[in-house]
Image (tube, rainbow, N blue to C red):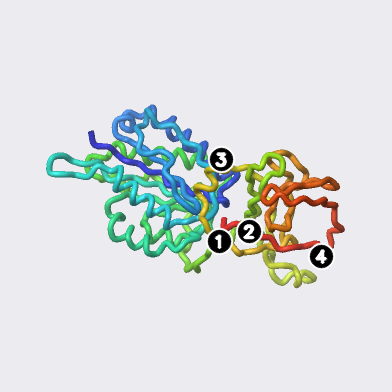
Amino acid sequence: MRRLPIFFVIDVSESMIGEPLEQVQDGMTSIIRDLKTDPYALETAYLSVIAFAGKAKTLLPLTDVVGFYPPQLGVGGGTSLGAALKHLMREIDLQIAPTTPERKGDWKPLIFLFTDGVPTDDYKATMKTWTEKYKSRTNLICVSFGEEASMPVLKELTDSVLLFNNAKDEDYKKFFKWVTASIKVSSVAVDGGSYGNGQQPGMAPTDDSIFTKVEITKTGDNLFDPRVAVFTAKCQSTKRLYLMKYNRVDMPANIPGMEKMPRSMYRLAGGYPVDDNMYRELTEAHKSDQKVNTADLVGYCSCPCCGNQFGFTMCECGNLFCGVVDKVNTCPWCSRQATYSLSSGGADDDFDVNRSIG
């Protein structure tokens, strides 16, 4: 039987942690629930999930609709588009049955790539391979979460690039219903690759209330995601890793009396525990040397793992962990011990801290 292969290539970088990743996890559940009621999808669709951050990993190989259960996505450091493409091409070579003189192979794969940020790796050589050898063999739909994702880069991958720029629960539900509808459209029309009605290949009609168009502008090469500042820390009590995510807030220019204020600050979005093993598997080996001064951070969280009041304590070794005041603290990274007290909060107490690459 000829299969319709469907790949979900999902950005699970640190900038996605929190509501975006939770919504994607829930969305995958809703997609498969709806597909299990569709006779065409049940007969032809096979789904695979690839997660990528600094590295890429197949969480589930091509599986029929009946046997598909959404995997836990996890999170990692970095947004390595090149690693994701390289892994996707390898999976296409390994999992897609080619056409031979004896039999017809699988249908042209339908690929959904979800990302929210700019690439943090050197993806250009891999992009060239994709364009020359794989682009014509696949139907790739790229969906950018947030207007600052690298739209020009995505346009090099495919002509089917959509911007999802809403963050309401209802909009996420509409979005994943559109993904489900696109899979159903493809399942019905696999008899020649013609998806009809003037739509792009594999795409159901889009809802203008959740998808918007943006102007394509040139972007520079970024080694970190400039939209967020994410910090990796470890719980003193449980030794678990957690992330503290801050969203960039650009200050208006030319406000009287605020000329010396920084042009950009970062507001706390939250603290999130992560799966240690999955994080290490998906995170790039090299560390970012980008620093943020604590004076530019607005808000601090408690430890999301054990509840310690202060989640943003820095050891002499340069790593962050959760701490308590006026008691002996043991750094879970290097085992140094120290007692901390509340500082006066003056400018001399500010310090630079390494950010993750996002």
Left or right, 192 with reference to 278: left
Point out the tag, 1 or 3, that comes first from the N-terminus: 3
Q: Residue at x 24, y 36 (%)?
A: 2
User: In front: 346, or 16?
Assistant: 346
Above or below — where is 117 with respect to 204? below
In primary-sequence order, the first of circles 1 and 2 is 1
Q: Earlier in the sequence, mark 4 or mark 1?
A: 1
Task: Tell me residue 26's x, y (percent).
Answer: 52, 36
Mark drawn on residue 115: none
Q: Residue at x 33, y 58 (%)?
A: 130
CA–CA distance in space, label 2 to label 4: 20 Å
Q: Which residue is mark 3?
A: 22
Secondary structure at badge 3 equals helix
- Marks 1 and 2: CB-CB under 8 Å? yes
Q: Secondary structure at mark 4?
A: helix
Q: In the rendered structure, which amino acid carries the disc numbered 2?
A: Arg
* Amino acid at circle 3: Glu
Residue ID for mark 2 = 355
Q: Position of residue 305 (x, y in %)?
A: 68, 40
Q: Front-most of 122 and 340?
A: 340
Q: Is residue 98 above or below residue 125?
A: above
Where is residue 133 shown, x and y percent of the image? 28, 57
User: Comparing marks 2 and 3, which lies closer to the viewer?
Assistant: 2
Nearer the N terminus, badge 4 or badge 3?
A: 3
Q: Check disc 1 and give the amino acid type.
A: Phe
- Distance between mark 4 and mark 3 Cα atoms: 37 Å
Residue in the image at 31% along x and 37% along y = 187
The residue that mark 1 highlights is 224
- Nearer the observer, 40 or 275: 275
Element at label 2: loop
Task: Identify the disc placed on residue 347.
Answer: 4
